[in-house]
Image (cartoon, grey):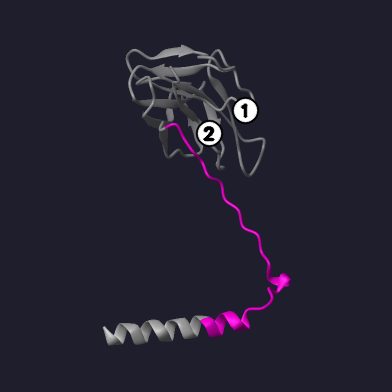
């Protein structure tokens, strides 16, 4: 017990000595930092995209380009919706098709189309401006296909797909 009292006294003395030397803040060292506190309603959507390897050359319509797997937890309705890149060039809402533009050359274009895979998939706008493929399950796996026969150029193409949970 005696050692604890001595240690406490030494700690107090050290803190007092430090406080005595802390008179002014160096205002030239003030830095700002910020963050975002996100408070959610408990609903979570996770998605993964698997891109199929492709080689340059001729390809047939309907070949699979990518698979999107999505799931939701905590939503009031056990359902998930997915859609294609409605911000992409050439987007057509009715066919859910659009163009992937090459990263190295804007003249390299791949025409793609988003398709549902599950039995019971429903296509609709669901309160948005774009068509979505919805499934009455909390997980879904849909696919991105080549839209028409085409010759693919060697390039890198960014693929964007979206997933969302239902409110009610």
Is residue 25 one of those drawn in magenta? yes
Question: Does 136 sit above or below residue 163?
Answer: above
In magenta, the rendered stretch is: 16-41
- For this rendering, which residue is in front, 35 or 60? 35
Percent of width and height locating residue 47:
42, 35
The circle drawn on residue 160 is 2
Seen from the viewer's position, the closer of residues 127 and 49 is 127
- Element carrying mark 2: loop
Q: Which residue is mark 1?
A: 87
Q: Residue furthest right?
A: 28
Identify the residue at image location x=67%, y=37%.
106
Quadrant of the rendering where the C terminus is positioned: top left
Residue drawn at (56%, 28%) of the image: 85
Q: Quadrant of the N terminus?
A: bottom left
Q: Nearer the viewer, residue 34 or 129?
A: 34
Q: Is 119 situated left or right of 39 in this image? A: left
Q: Position of residue 22 (x, y in %)?
A: 62, 79
Secondary element under disc 1, as helix, strand or loop, is loop
Q: Residue at x 70, y 74 (%)?
A: 26
Residue located at (36% from left, 29% from top): 74
Say if mark 1 contacts mark 2, CB within 8 Å: yes
Quarter location, residue 25: bottom right
* Sequence-first tag of 1 and 2: 1
In space, the residues marked 1 and 2 are separated at their CA atoms by 9 Å
Magenta residues: mostly which secondary structure?
Answer: loop
* Residue 59 image point, x, y percent: 47, 29
- Reply yes or no: does residue 65 show up in magenta: no
- Disc on res. 74: none
Direction from residue 158 to residue 32 in the image, left or right:
right
Label 1 crowd (10 A; few <14 / some 14-19 / many >=20) = few
């Amino acid at each position: 017990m005696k050692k604890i009292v001595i240690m406490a006294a030494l700690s107090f003395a050290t803190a007092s000595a430090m406080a005595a030397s802390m008179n002014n803040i160096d205002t030239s060292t003030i830095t700002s930092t910020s963050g975002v506190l996100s408070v959610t309603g408990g609903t979570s959507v996770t998605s993964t995209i698997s891109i199929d390897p492709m080689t340059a050359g001729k390809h047939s319509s309907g070949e699979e380009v990518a698979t999107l797997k999505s799931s939701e937890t905590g939503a009031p309705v056990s359902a998930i919706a997915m859609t294609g890149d409605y911000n992409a060039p050439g987007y057509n809402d009715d066919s859910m098709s659009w163009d992937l533009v090459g990263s190295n050359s804007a003249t390299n274009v791949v025409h793609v189309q988003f398709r549902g895979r599950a039995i019971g998939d429903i296509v609709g706008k669901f309160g948005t401006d774009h068509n979505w493929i919805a499934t009455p399950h909390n997980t879904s796996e849909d696919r991105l296909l080549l839209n028409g026969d085409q010759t693919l150029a060697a390039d890198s193409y960014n693929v964007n797909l979206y997933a969302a949970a239902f409110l009610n």
